[in-house]
Image (cartoon, helix red, strand yellow):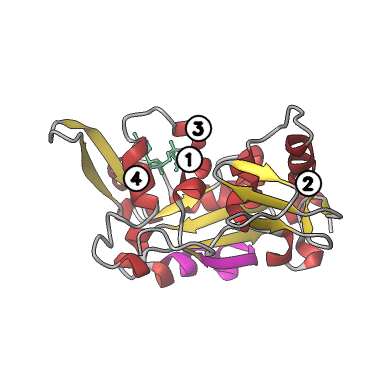
């Protein structure tokens, strides 16, 4: 397969889409018949604070960031039903996967989407006010039903953040993999080589990882500078392991 044919992108069907029963609609819009894209991976994810804040790391510090984390974690759409807080995470593969899915999703702002691209997925989204603890309006949050990777760099970071190699059929692996020969344990923001009560094993000998993940884990254990934070690597290994807020 040529490189251009195996381009992959991450899609998240966000909690507002699930709440409004738009999952089937979104999947139809993205179907192979419409887009020429194929599923490479799919999972239902209860989104942890760690995963949410790594996914939206570029927006840290912005006024809408705390609200965005609550939104993607389903806390706003399912305040009383924590067990319903999920997103559907999908990897799509095929020619121009990234730009095709962005195109069908439409502009970030649902009002702009309605005005300029009627019929796109995000034209069905809503704008909600973001308030501080005292009730003062800080600005707007955009509940826009779908996340789609914006460019090849984001797609790589995001696919590796949400999916392990074993979540994707081997012939569809988009990035190099490596098999670990060591144990890596995680607790309270720190990485360890040995087990102690309360430490969670994130990678064991024989586990298949993205090669870049293994490089980062090894660097962190050695106390060297690493390309990513420990959270950016371990968040995926903790997916659906802990139920936050249930
Ligand atoms: O999702 P996209 O890449 O189009 O937009 P972004 O600028 O990377 O922002 C990520 C997400 O944050 C958006 O999809 C919105 O849900 C939310 N957002 C917001 O609520 N208010 C903003 N002013 C900007 C983004
Ligand atoms: Mg973005």
Looking at the image, tell me whether mark 4 or mark 1 is earlier in sequence order: 1
Ligand 1 within 8 Å of the CB at mark 3: yes
Tell me if 232 is positioned left or right of 87 in this view. right
Ligand 1 within 8 Å of the CB at mark 1: yes
Q: Secondary structure at mark 3?
A: helix
Picture layout, residue 71 above or below residue 139: below
Viewer-proximal residue among 237 and 204: 204
Q: Name the quarter where the N terminus is drawn.
A: bottom right
- What number is the disc on residue 214? 2
Q: Which residues are magenta?
A: 26-44
* Crowd rating for badge 2 (residues with CA inside 10 Å; few <14, some 14–19, many 20+): many
Disc 1: which residue: 56
Q: Position of residue 65 (x, y in %)?
A: 37, 36
Residue farthest to the left, as pictured: 135
Q: Secondary structure at mark 2?
A: helix
Calculate the distance from the C-alpha at mark 4 to the C-alpha at mark 3.
22 Å
Q: Secondary structure at mark 1?
A: loop
Q: Do the residues bearing badges 4 and 1 touch, measured as CB atoms within 8 Å? A: no
């Amino acid at each position: 397969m040529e490189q251009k044919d195996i381009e992959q992108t991450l899609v998240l069907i966000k909690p507002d889409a699930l709440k409004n029963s738009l999952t089937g609609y979104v999947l139809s819009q993205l179907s192979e018949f419409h887009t020429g894209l194929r599923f490479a991976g799919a999972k239902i994810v209860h989104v942890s604070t760690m995963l949410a804040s790594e996914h939206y790391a570029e927006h840290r510090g912005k006024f809408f960031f705390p609200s965005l984390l609550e939104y993607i974690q389903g806390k706003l759409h399912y305040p009383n039903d924590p067990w319903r807080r999920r997103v559907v995470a999908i990897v799509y593969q095929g020619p121009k996967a990234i730009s095709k899915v962005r195109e069908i999703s439409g502009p970030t702002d649902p009002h702009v989407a309605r005005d300029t691209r009627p019929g796109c997925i995000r034209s069905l989204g809503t704008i909600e006010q973001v308030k501080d603890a005292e009730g003062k309006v800080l600005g707007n949050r955009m509940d826009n039903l779908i996340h789609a990777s914006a460019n090849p760099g984001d797609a790589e970071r995001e696919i590796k953040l949400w999916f392990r190699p074993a979540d994707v059929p081997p012939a569809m692996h988009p990035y190099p993999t490596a098999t670990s020969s060591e144990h890596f344990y995680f607790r309270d923001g720190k990485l360890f080589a040995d087990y102690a009560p309360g430490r969670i094993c994130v990678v064991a000998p024989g586990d298949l990882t993205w090669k870049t993940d293994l490089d980062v884990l090894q660097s962190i254990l050695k106390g060297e500078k690493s390309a990513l934070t420990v959270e950016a690597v371990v968040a995926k290994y903790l997916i659906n392991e802990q139920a936050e807020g249930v």
